[in-house]
């Protein structure tokens, strides 16, 4: 019996209609244009493509429902559970613009209309920097909290800042996760707990995203360079003792 092909997962962060500092915001209007472009190119939004959002920002509570009414697409939102209902103090962009995360009520409301949720850790900390005990608390605590809010089993995790090593993978498996997602581009050798994704940034046109999906080295390099800036947040958090 043939298994279902693994979809290409697009990785988004913010989807705010207004200006946002940084390069991770992809407004709803442009998001819709991208979906239409991919469908025009023959991609199925329920088979070939899946959508993921890291960080679980509050504006998704308003942005996602109308899009889900107009389109059918696979969707999962990864939430750092320690920041539910709070502003993103973990991110250096808060210096310019503070952005709130989804509240408990907003997560439940989205889950009730079919949004799947996964863990993004508890404190949005580089998991590779934690002790074994801290790592276990991050992974188990975030999964149990999300399950208590959504009423659904949580089996997926997106590694904060895309950082993962063999020790983290072992802990993730022990904590009961079945799928784990990085910020590396997908390859044929990806395994269940190290699935790559195609990142989408604010400067990306639909054509650029399509080229990245199809393996453009230039588009891959642009994405890798952009993702490298996340190291700045990791460094600042370490200097702040987080």
Image (cartoon, helix red, strand yellow):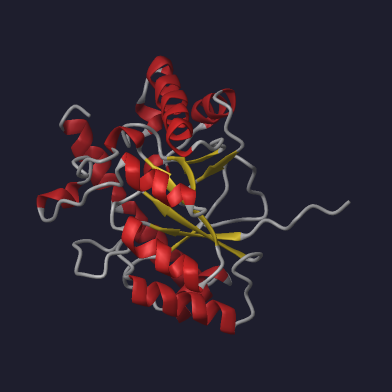
Please tell me whether residue 170 is drawn above or below residue 178 in the rendered image.
above
Residue 63 position within the rendered picture, expressed as x and y whole percent measured from the top left: 35, 64
Please tell me whether residue 210 is drawn above or below residue 24 in the rendered image.
below
As drawn, is 67 to the left or to the right of 230? Answer: right
User: Residue 138 sits in which quadrant?
Assistant: top left
User: Residue 108 sits in which quadrant?
Assistant: top left
As drawn, is 66 to the left or to the right of 93? Answer: right
Instruction: Tell me the residue at 36%/31% (across/down).
Output: 122
Instruction: Tell me the residue at 36%/55% (across/down).
Output: 227
Q: Quadrant of the C terminus?
A: top left
User: Which residue is farthest bottom?
Assistant: 40
User: Residue 26 sits in which quadrant?
Assistant: bottom left
Q: Is residue 14 visible?
A: no
User: Which residue is farthest right?
Assistant: 1
User: Which residue is farthest left?
Assistant: 95
Residue 194 position within the rendered picture, expressed as x and y whole percent measured from the top left: 57, 43
Residue 225 position within the rendered picture, expressed as x and y whole percent measured from the top left: 35, 60
As drawn, is 92 to the left or to the right of 61? Answer: left
Front residue of 35/220: it is 35
Front residue of 57/6: it is 57
């Amino acid at each position: 019996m043939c298994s279902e092909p693994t979809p290409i997962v697009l990785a988004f962060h913010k989807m705010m209609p207004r200006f946002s500092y940084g390069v991770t915001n992809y407004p709803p209007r442009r998001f819709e244009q991208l979906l239409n472009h991919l469908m025009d190119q023959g991609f199925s939004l329920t088979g070939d493509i899946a959508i993921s959002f890291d960080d679980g920002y509050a504006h998704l509570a308003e942005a996602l429902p109308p899009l889900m009414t107009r389109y059918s697409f696979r969707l999962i939102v990864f939430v750092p559970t320690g920041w539910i209902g709070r502003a993103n103090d973990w991110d250096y962009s808060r210096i310019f613009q503070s952005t709130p995360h989804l509240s408990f009520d907003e997560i439940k409301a989205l889950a009730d209309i079919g949004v799947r949720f996964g863990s993004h850790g508890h404190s949005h900390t580089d998991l590779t920097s934690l002790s074994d005990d801290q790592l276990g608390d991050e992974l188990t605590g975030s999964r149990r909290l999300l399950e208590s809010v959504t009423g659904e089993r949580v089996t997926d995790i997106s590694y904060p800042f895309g950082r993962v090593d063999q020790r983290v993978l072992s802990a993730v498996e022990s904590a009961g996760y079945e799928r784990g997602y990085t910020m590396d581009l997908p390859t044929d050798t990806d395994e269940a707990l190290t699935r790559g994704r195609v990142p989408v940034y604010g400067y990306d046109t639909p054509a650029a995203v399509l080229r990245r999906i199809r393996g453009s080295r230039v588009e891959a390099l642009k994405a890798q360079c952009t993702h490298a800036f996340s190291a700045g947040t990791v460094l600042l958090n370490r200097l702040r003792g987080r």
